[in-house]
Image (spheres, grey):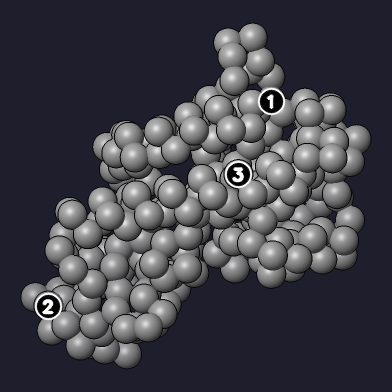
């Protein structure tokens, strides 16, 4: 019998977690995969850095990561996720009068999986399928702030292009912004991603603190003047509703 290569072991671990109906301990993984505990731990830690697997911070048990689900079960995962999110998004549009959107991390950039404008005439702020740099704007910087460390450091250290009048391209200042967003749990921006556009965003996090998505609003900068705090309250309220709905769905499933 041929000896398993590192790639073989990595695939075996990911396939095991992908079909498991519950989180697995490192002992269970060793028993089921026939990969030694020390090797499995090393591989899983590397996979976790890139969001291929996730580890519960309290139990230290492993599950398949969101990046795996996004890449290999994209249609059904997004469809189910959005079925849960749409009523919350509709409510947020109604409460703020701005475009509400959900975006995910796709490699080193952001990808908007759903955007709902307040009317058919106001679709310039964001749209479904939009790709954008994650160093710019509240929408992008929430993804950057809560991205896996390897992705975050790569983007922070790279040179950047100014895509709007207020885009932050200085690494030191951007690092400070990211640290503040991680601490505060939200982001504001004005004219950073698009000219004449402002936004408010929060992260949607999984049970282990892993990034699931960005959630927030965007619209004409004039609409946000003097209303950032008001809009933040509505975005946080909607994010809590979405988080509750996702937890209820997970418990039911």
Residue for badge 1 = 125
The answer to whether the residue labelled 1 contacts the one labelled 3, judged by CB atoms less than 8 Å apart, is: no
Q: CA distance from mark 1 to mark 3?
A: 18 Å
- Numbered tag placed on residue 32 in the rendering: 2
Pick whichever, 189 or 164, lies toward us: 189
Do we see residue 214 in this rendering? no
Q: Residues within 10 Å of mark 2 (few under 14, many from 20)?
A: few
Q: State the residue at coordinates (64%, 49%).
A: 233
Numbered badge on residue 234: 3
Quick one: SS at disc 2?
helix
Task: Of the two numbered discs 1 and 2 on the same chain, state the one appearing first in sequence.
Answer: 2
Q: Residues within 10 Å of mark 1 (few under 14, many from 20)?
A: many
- Residue 130 location, quadrant: top right
In x, y percent, where is residue 74? 34, 39
In screen coordinates, is 230 left or right of 112?
right
Q: Residue at x 18, y 68 (%)?
A: 22
Horizontal side of 126 relative to 191 (left or right) equals left
Q: Earlier in the sequence, mark 1 or mark 3?
A: 1
Residue 10: horizontal and vertical position, in percent? 30, 69
Q: Residue at x 48, y 29 (%)?
A: 90
194 left or right of 55 in image: right
As displayed, is residue 83 above or below residue 141?
A: above
Tag 1 and tag 2, C-beta contact below 8 Å: no
Measure how far apart labels 2 and 3 are at the Cα level.
46 Å
């Amino acid at each position: 019998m041929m000896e398993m290569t590192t790639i073989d072991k990595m695939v075996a671990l990911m396939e095991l977690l992908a079909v498991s109906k519950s989180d697995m301990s490192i002992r269970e993984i060793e028993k089921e995969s026939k990969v030694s505990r020390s090797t499995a731990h090393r591989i899983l830690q590397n996979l976790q850095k890139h969001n291929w697997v996730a580890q519960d911070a309290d139990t230290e048990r492993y599950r398949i990561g969101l990046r795996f689900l996004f890449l290999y079960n994209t249609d059904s995962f997004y469809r189910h996720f959005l079925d849960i999110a749409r009523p919350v998004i509709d409510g947020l549009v109604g409460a703020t009068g701005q475009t509400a959107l959900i975006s995910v991390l796709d490699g080193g950039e952001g990808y908007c999986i759903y955007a709902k404008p307040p009317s058919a005439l106001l679709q310039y702020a964001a749209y479904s399928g939009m790709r954008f740099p994650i160093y710019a704007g509240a929408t992008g910087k929430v993804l950057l702030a809560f991205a896996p460390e390897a992705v975050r450091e790569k983007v922070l250290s790279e040179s950047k292009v100014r895509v709007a009048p207020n885009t932050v391209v200085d690494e030191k200042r951007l690092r400070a912004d990211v640290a503040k967003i991680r601490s505060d749990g939200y982001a504001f921006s004005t004219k950073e991603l698009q000219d004449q556009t402002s936004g408010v965003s929060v992260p949607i996090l999984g049970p282990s603190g892993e990034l699931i998505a960005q959630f927030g609003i965007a619209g004409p900068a004039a609409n946000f003047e003097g209303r950032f705090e008001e809009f933040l309250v509505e975005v946080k309220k909607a994010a809590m509703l979405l988080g509750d709905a996702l937890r209820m769905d997970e418990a039911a499933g």
